[in-house]
Image (spheres, helix red, strand yellow):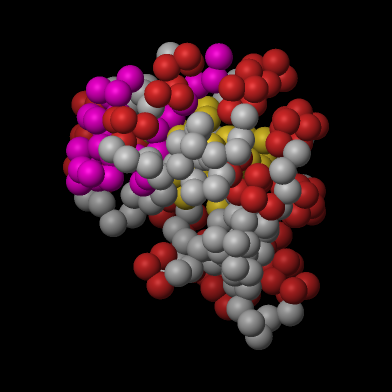
Amino acid sequence: MPRFAANLSFLFTERPFLERFAAARAAGFTAVEFHFPYELDRAALAEVVMTSGLDVVLFNLPPGDWAAGERGIACHPRRVAEFQDGVGQALEYARLLGCGKLNCLAGVAPGDVAHEKARETLVENLRFAAAVTARAGIELVLEPLNTRDTPGFFVPTTRSGLAVIRDVGSGNLRVQYDIYHAQVMEGDLARTLQEHLAQIGHIQLADNPGRHEPGTGEINFSFLLQHLDRIGYAGWVGCEYKPSGRTEDSFGWLEPWR
């Protein structure tokens, strides 16, 4: 049976961030994920995680200026030092929170940088990050994002993500497969998941269109979640969706999987 983690950057947003842990626990979750911990007080965050009893299973490397629209800097040739510093910062938080997985967002390449140079930078940055995280016993994943929501995103499909991972050549780098992004860009979800299961380190879900909870759109989640069981996926599935109403009212789809 799939194991579900509440994404606290999308769920329970009716509450301040640190109060979302208790809300997730009350809703029956045993694990959480979120985008970024870096602006939070470390001691307060660690205490909330400890007292909630929840596992933190994933968060992202620093993305650059998120408020200004940046969605990662790993493909920026002029920001390699910033990227490397961000990996170190992420590792500090991962150790503090007991988190075993970090996600890298490739970003949008600067307009004045050739595609080949941006790709070379991404590969080298991932090679660095995969090596550093491996020494810390933490797995690195790379997430493709759809170019409808994030125009120009450098790694927009599963295929492009796998190609980058192949060139990095590290056993400590796999794909973060977001069902919503994959449906927008490529579809063919069940076959892709089965064919590339060994190279998938984490899965997230949301329905399409709207990026709301399962059952609000076109994706057959009843089939797809059973398919994950059939093919032997043993990792977490992050619930990274925008509730169509109050968060607690969006969990009807989850009841058969409790």
Q: Is residue 124 above or below residue 20?
A: below
Q: Which residues are magenta?
A: 1-28
**153 and 141: which one is in front?**
153
The number of discs equals 0
Q: Quadrant of residue 208?
A: top right
The residue lying at 44 percent from left, 22 percent from top is 254
Q: Quadrant of the C terminus?
A: top left
Q: Residue 122: within the magenta?
A: no
Give the quadrant of residue 75: bottom right
Residue 149, horizontal then vertical, whole percent: 55, 61
**Is 149 or 127 nearer to us in this picture?**
149
- Answer yes or no: is residue 189 visible: yes
Query: What residue appears at the point 25 percent right and 23 percent down from the top-left corner?
Result: 26
Name the residue: 74% across, 67% down. Answer: 120
Horizontal arrangement in the rendering, residue 222 relative to residue 5 (left or right): right
Image position, residue 62 (x, y; %): 45, 58
Foreground residue among 87 and 108: 108
Picture residue at 37% right of the left edge, 32% below the top = 250
Report the side of 226 relative to 59 (left or right). right
* Magenta-colored stretch includes residue 23: yes
Q: Is residue 21 above or below residue 77?
A: above
Residue 9: x %, y % from top left = 36, 46
Q: Is residue 233 visible?
A: no
The relative height of residue 194 versus residue 110 in the rendered view (above or below) is above
